[in-house]
Image (cartoon, rainbow, N blue to C red):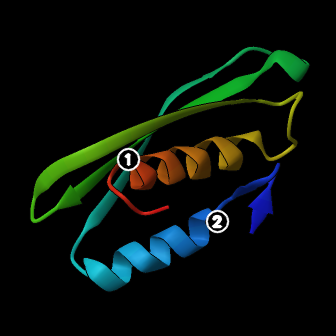
Amino acid sequence: MNLKGKEYLQVRHRIQWFREVYPKGILKTQMLALQGEGPTEYAVFKTEVYIDGVMVSSGHKKETRGGFDDFIEKAESGSVGRALAMCGFG
């Protein structure tokens, strides 16, 4: 898809591609922070990508409640997308 004038591969498609290439690969997500109140509340996630038991990349993402009602989900999926992009998926 085209996002702000650039080609963008949605995270769900990156995950599918990763699973096809590395069916035993691991995407490990971890919430690092959930802090604040109201619109300034934020979540921070980290994702690590493992291939054959070796961590090959990681990605982080922070989102605020003020930006998205589903800010926790958005932070997690954003960290997955960044981690997969770092190892060539996306």
68 vs 32, left or right, is right
As helix, strand or loop, the secondary structure at mark 2 comes to: loop
Going by the numbered disc 1, the residue's amino acid type is Met
The image quadrant where one finds the N terminus is bottom right
Q: Which numbered marker is on residue 86?
A: 1
Q: In this view, does 14 lie above or below 64?
A: below
Q: In this view, does 10 lie above or below 30?
A: below
Q: Which residue is drawn at 52% across and 44% down?
A: 79
Q: In this view, does 47 lie above or below 27?
A: above
Label 2: few (<14), some (14–19) or many (≥20) C-alpha neighbours in 10 Å: few
Residue 25 lies, in percent from the top left, at 24, 69
Residue 71 lies, in percent from the top left, at 75, 40
Q: Which numbered marker is on residue 10?
A: 2
Going by the numbered disc 2, the residue's amino acid type is Gln
Q: Which residue is drawn at 83% across and 31% down?
A: 65
Label 1: few (<14), some (14–19) or many (≥20) C-alpha neighbours in 10 Å: some
As helix, strand or loop, the secondary structure at mark 1 comes to: helix
Residue 4 lies, in percent from the top left, at 82, 49
82 vs 39, left or right, is left
Looking at marks 2 and 1 on the same chain, the residue that comes earlier in the sequence is marked by 2
Farthest-out residue, front: 5
35 vs 15, left or right, is right
Residue 13 lies, in percent from the top left, at 56, 75
Q: How far apart are marks 2 and 1 (CA)?
A: 14 Å
10 vs 16, left or right, is right
- Disc 2 and disc 1 in contact, CB within 8 angstroms: no
Q: Which residue is drawn at 87% across and 32% down?
A: 67
Figure disc tally: 2
Q: Which residue is drawn at 89% across and 27% down?
A: 66
Q: In this view, does 34 lie above or below 77?
A: above
